[in-house]
Amino acid sequence: MDSTLPAVAEELLKEIKKAFQETSHVPDELLLGLKFIFGPSAVPALDLVDQRSVTRVTSPSGRTLYQVLGSSGKLYTCYSSCHFCTCPAFGFSVLQKSESLLCKHILAVYLSQAMGACQELSVSEEQLTSILLAEEEDEG
């Protein structure tokens, strides 16, 4: 997980990972904790995990990013290392308004990591660069 999250959120994600490894499901009390800590992002993030919408993209040099197919059908790029998503909700609710810890896409990344539910995609350095440049063009 990422150390930019509050300790209580980190601990909850660790508990989810442990419970999922032991029983292949997340107990109700942890789901309630998820909803309490992450609010309205929790249920949509779980839906994204259920739909296997999270892909871990790695290059030969070890660079990693995540792509999440959002409920709208748009692909968002997430960076768990710096706790960032390219979606408009992250920019507005997380960065500008500070209403949320994170968007549903980043939460889906963390939950997919905890539950071992990430799709895996290996790309060349050139392909990774293209992904990053495409995101830059979308923002500009």
Image: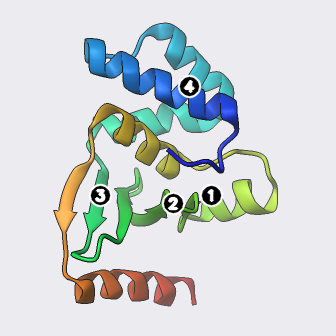
| Residue type, label 4 | Leu
Percent x, y for residue 121?
A: 19, 63
Distance from the alpha carbon under mark 2 to that under mark 1: 19 Å
Image label count:
4
Q: Nearer the viewer, mark 2 or mark 3?
A: 2
- Identify whether 116 is placed above or below 82: above
Residue holding disc 4: 12
> In the depicted view, which residue is nearer to us: 69 or 9?
9
Q: Nearer the viewer, mark 2 or mark 1?
A: 2
At horizontal 27% and vertical 12% (from top left) the residue drawn is: 23
Q: Is residue 105 visible?
A: yes
- First in residue order: circle 2 vs circle 1: 2
| Residue type, label 3 | Arg
Residue holding disc 2: 81
- First in residue order: circle 2 vs circle 3: 3
Residue holding disc 1: 89
| Residue type, label 1 | Ala
- First in residue order: circle 4 vs circle 2: 4
Residue holding disc 3: 56
At horizontal 29% and vertical 58% (from top left) the residue drawn is: 56
Which corner quadrant of the image does residue 47 belong to? top left
Give the crowd class for mark 1: few <14, some 14-19, many >=20 residues within 10 Å: some
Distance from the alpha carbon under mark 3 to that under mark 1: 21 Å
Which corner quadrant of the image does residue 125 belong to? bottom left
In the structure shown, which secondary structural element does the residue marked by tag 4 occupy?
Answer: helix
